[in-house]
Amino acid sequence: GLYAPSALVLTMGHGNSAATVNPERAVTLNCAPTASGTHPAALQACAELRGAGGDFDALTVRGDVACTKQFDPVVVTVDGVWQGKRVSYERTFANECVKNSYGMTVFTF
């Protein structure tokens, strides 16, 4: 093919680790050949991931978001394929506001 596949499933649930959390939300994100999926901002999320080289840890907190210190942990998982390479990622955030403050659109679902 002309492009390497990029197809991801992202989940979110409340708790400390993916092993003990039941996903409350799950979205799909396909970035090749075009952006699609059930992610609410697929086009922007794909562009953001391309800009980060597919590195979810490179999505850093934005300075324009003020979140409370409330501890209500949420776990985000990402599984699938990014530009032909297998991806399995997990990250725990202190609360949902903090989750949404990382990067611009990838984690906002």
Image: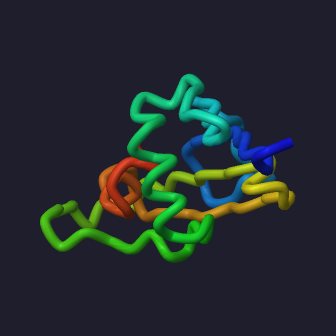
Instruction: Evaluate whether residue 94 shows in this view.
Output: yes
Instruction: Give the residue displayed 31% in from the left and 59% down from the top.
Output: 101
Most distant residue in the front direction: 2
**Foreground pick, 11 / 71:** 11
Most distant residue in the top direction: 38
Q: Position of residue 24 (x, y in %)?
A: 59, 30
Q: Position of residue 65 (x, y in %)?
A: 17, 62
Q: Is residue 89 above or below residue 52?
A: above
**Foreground pick, 61 / 42:** 42
Q: Quadrant of the N terminus?
A: top right
Q: Is residue 12 above or below residue 86?
A: above
Q: Position of residue 94 (x, y in %)?
A: 43, 64
Which colour scheme appears in the figure? rainbow
State left or right for residue 94 relative to residue 38. Answer: left
Q: Is residue 51 above or below residue 31?
A: below
Q: Position of residue 35 (x, y in %)?
A: 54, 34
Instruction: Evaluate whether residue 107 shows in this view.
Output: no
**Foreground pick, 87 / 11:** 87
Instruction: Give the residue displayed 53% in from the left and 60% down from the top.
Output: 50
Q: Quadrant of the C terminus?
A: top left
Instruction: Give the residue displayed 52% in from the left and 59% down from the top.
Output: 49
Instruction: Give the residue displayed 59% in from the left and 53% down from the top.
Output: 75
Q: Is residue 89 above or below residue 44?
A: below
State left or right for residue 44 relative to residue 37. Answer: left
